[in-house]
Image (cartoon, rainbow, N blue to C red):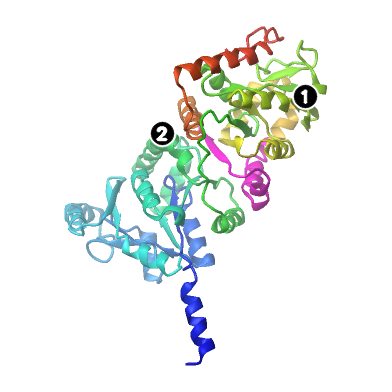
Amino acid sequence: MNSSFKQSLVEKAKEEKKLGKLIILAGPSGAGKSFMADILVDQFHFSLLNKYVTRPFRETEIRNINNGKNIGLKPVRGRFNDGEKELDIQKQFSTARKQAFKNLNLPLRYENYEELYGFSLDEIDNSIEHGRNVVAIIYNNRVINKLKNIYGENCQTCYIHRVDPNDINYFLRMSQERGSSTEDALKRQQQAMNDFKRYAPTLVNYDHIILNTENNNQRLYQITQHLVSMPNKKMPQTENDSAKIYVIISTPAAGKNAITKMVNNQGCLDTLIMPKMAARKRVEKDGEEMICMGDTLYDMDACDIQYINYGTTYGIDTKELEERQKDGISSTLILSNIEAIQKLKQKFSTALVPIYVHGSPHFKDDYILQHQGDIDSPYYQQRIEDFDKATELYYELFSAEGQNKIGDIEVILNVGDSADLELQLNSIIDYYSKGRNWSKSNRIAYQNNVRKHQAKYRNTDTKEFLYE
């Protein structure tokens, strides 16, 4: 062996070993987990993690297996867990399947739809150690957290959202496609509703929330392509008294007004609403987050960030935001303009937390009904047209270009339940306010600072005190 070749082997041995990654897909039944996993397997050469399951295989799954496709499921009893037999025979062997599952002594197991799922970690270990990527479909927070703890930065978690879990028609269509009964559709819808309520406060812990809300496979392919190269969500900085600027981004009627009300009702320890200037007369829907032309405190010239939405100029006074930050006060700002958000990002860096609020499609119909008297005005016509672009803003933000502009994005899924909306909002605020020091002396100083900033926005034309 010549010396140069020998030296190359020594250098190669010193090289850092490239590890694979584990992408976990979670979400309710019918969200698109399997479709997205297929993209990762077929287009990006991921291997699909095999899970043992006690339920009988479905007809579509049996066809796929017979056609040589890996569906990511292993039987615990027979080739298809009795899936080729009649329903009464399948039920008859249910106890035997569950006992066979328990005999496997798998390290990670969970229950879903009254069936048991589990897998060995050896398959993941072997793939990651040899630089191969793995995709796993799992919907159990305890198991997901375990995998996140085990594989750390090599584990990426994604929650996939498709439809409002209250939409029974969607689940009926899904059951028809699967050859299941109406009873099964109702059961799945109830499970989806229960799952959403249980997981709503934990969505912030996922690295990415993926909206699969369009009948556009190319869109999901583009998201998946970008996902493969994306890093995990960064943990927030946890310095004591670090204030944040929460920017609420959404389409019309997706929940901005509800979030404004929640922030105002929760007291000053979490965050204060930051009002914007609007170069138009006040309308009935305007609340405490808006200072309009003709209002006592209106001063567009004081706003160093200005932008146009719906033909109206809006402004933000970043000097006020800076002063609040120095005083340790977090702010919440309603803002759906990419350029303005980018300017805030450039100025406030990691203190800026963009939050995209996604509303259900039926919100458009509700909005039209609520504003029938004004529906012919150019303003409301423009807002209605914007419903047809309900996810465009999200997709722009999720793209590589959007990530470069404003960084990580949190997502709130508004399915029409204010309690769920509040849980998600508060979980995000709690996530980003870790490490705050709320000793008695700090609280007193903080509240004095809050009063100082509140005084700036009293006696406005809303006839109310802001933030109280």
Viewer-side residue, 269 vs 110: 269
Expressed as whole percent of the image width and height from the top left, the position of residue 353 reads 59, 36
Q: CA distance from mark 2 to mark 1?
A: 38 Å
Residue 53 lies left or right of residue 288; in this view the side is left
Question: Which mark, residue 100?
Answer: none
Say if 122 sits above or below 428 in the image: below
Name, please, the residue furthest toward the right. Answer: 301
Expressed as whole percent of the image width and height from the top left, the position of residue 226 reads 59, 56
Residue 44 lies left or right of residue 466; in this view the side is left
Quadrant housing residue 300: top right
The magenta stretch spans which residues? 387-415
Expressed as whole percent of the image width and height from the top left, the position of residue 117 reads 29, 53
Say if 44 sits above or below 205 in the image: below
Name, please, the residue furthest toward the front. Answer: 3
Q: Tell whether label 1 touches label 2 (CB within 8 Å).
A: no
Report which residue position mark 2 lands on.
197
Q: Residue at x 83, y 22 (%)?
A: 301
Report which residue position mark 1 lands on.
377
Disc 1 element:
loop
Q: Amino acid at mark 1?
A: Ser
Q: Amino acid at mark 2?
A: Lys
Q: Residue at x 65, y 28 (%)?
A: 334
Disc 2 element:
helix
Q: Residue at x 64, y 27 (%)?
A: 333
Q: Is residue 325 magenta?
A: no
Whether residue 279 appears in this view of the structure is: no
Say if 331 sits above or below 393 in the image: above
Expressed as whole percent of the image width and height from the top left, the position of residue 26 reads 43, 48
For the residue carrying disc 2, how many other residues have a C-alpha within 10 Å: few (<14), some (14-19), or many (20+)? some
